[in-house]
Amino acid sequence: MFSFFRKKAPAEPAAVVTPARPAAPAPAAVETPAVPDPGWFGRLSHGLRKTGGSIAAVFTGTRIDAALYEELEAALLMADAGTAATQALLEALKRRVKETQATDPAAVKALLADVLAAQLEPLQKPLVVGEHRPTVMMVVGVNGAGKTTSIGKLTRHLAEGGCKVLLAAADTFRAAAREQLAVWADRAQVQIVSQEGADPAAVTFDAVSAGAARGCDVVIADTAGRLPTQAHLMEELKKIQRVIGRAQAGAPHEVLLVVDGNTGQNALAQVKAFDAALGLTGLVVTKLDGTAKGGVLAAIARWGVERGRVVPVYFIGVGEQLEDLQRFDAREFAEALLR
């Protein structure tokens, strides 16, 4: 059964509930499943066909030689895997080929899938809710990455999994963002805190306070799109983060960056910049159904391993439908990429 996120019961009963909503007995920690989607793997493979096709073409010959490894190196670099991840993948693959004494290109391709899955495994981690009540999530990203849409989809999945969710429309500079988030709130039948023209930090403070008072499980703050090179705008995000901490000690518990899978190595640059400013806890990689170069996930994983702290990829998306946002699985992604 596919698990979209993990819902964990708090160690103690919730400290704040509304009088009209008596506290229910705390359930045991559970993995809350999403509706099984047999078509997900096919859509993911189709979305990654540009990258996967280039890599798969390397294995159409009959010989395992230096030329094959050179072609594979070029294909991985073109897929935006980056130099460090590419070299790590090639070294690991050569060791596996030597250990297994593989002589068939198809067998080597299968070994590459194993090696790639192992390289991506540090990115695989479930989003946990329930350790804090409410669990406060601050979502950031550049304009056009699919941030608000991803929040909407995540909200639907959380609500359908039994979580009481409150949204904070902290992108007060773009009217369409508030309207778009309000549509998702209506679809998921969750509450939203929104105020036109208000200070984003103030809106977020009110939302976190309201979430605690109303006994919500999750509060999600949608922030305005920011380019990491715009220092004054990044400072605004830092301010929002500080204000959230004033509204609830220890919050935000999750700082999620939404990145467009079509941006290649620029996605890694965004991860580095936002992490340096805010301390990211997770990623959502969207739009893997276009010209996305899926190798960038290997680059993100390698960067995290080298510095000793990996930012996990909680979810990946391949389209606009609710079911097109799913939890990241390293083995599934590797096999879809090399299909």
Image (cartoon, grey):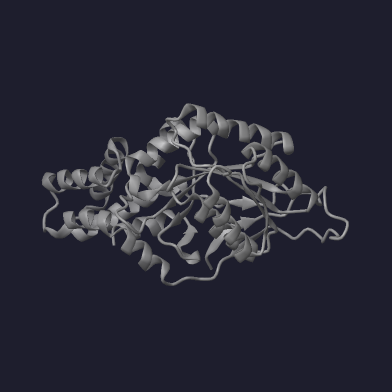
Which image quadrant is residue 58 in?
bottom left
Front-most of residues 15 and 55: 15
Q: Residue at x 74, y 51 (%)?
A: 10
Instruction: Judge whether 8 appears above or below 45 on screen.
Output: above
| Quadrant including the C terminus | bottom left
Q: Residue at x 27, y 36 (%)?
A: 83
Report whether 193 appears left or right of 2. Answer: right
**Residue 37 image offset from top left, x and y in percent:** 47, 70
Q: Residue furthest right?
A: 19
Front-most of residues 337 and 234: 234
Report whether 102 appears left or right of 288. Answer: left
Front-most of residues 149 and 292: 149
Instruction: Judge whether 231 appears above or below 14 on screen.
Output: above
**Residue 327 image offset from top left, x and y in percent:** 49, 57
Front-most of residues 158 and 26: 158
How many labels sit on residues? 0
Q: Residue at x 48, y 60 (%)?
A: 326
Report whether 337 appears left or right of 213. Answer: left
Report whether 205 appears left or right of 222. Answer: right
Q: Residue at x 23, y 45 (%)?
A: 78
**Residue 144 image offset from top left, x and y in percent:** 42, 48
**Residue 304 image offset from top left, x and y in percent:** 44, 36
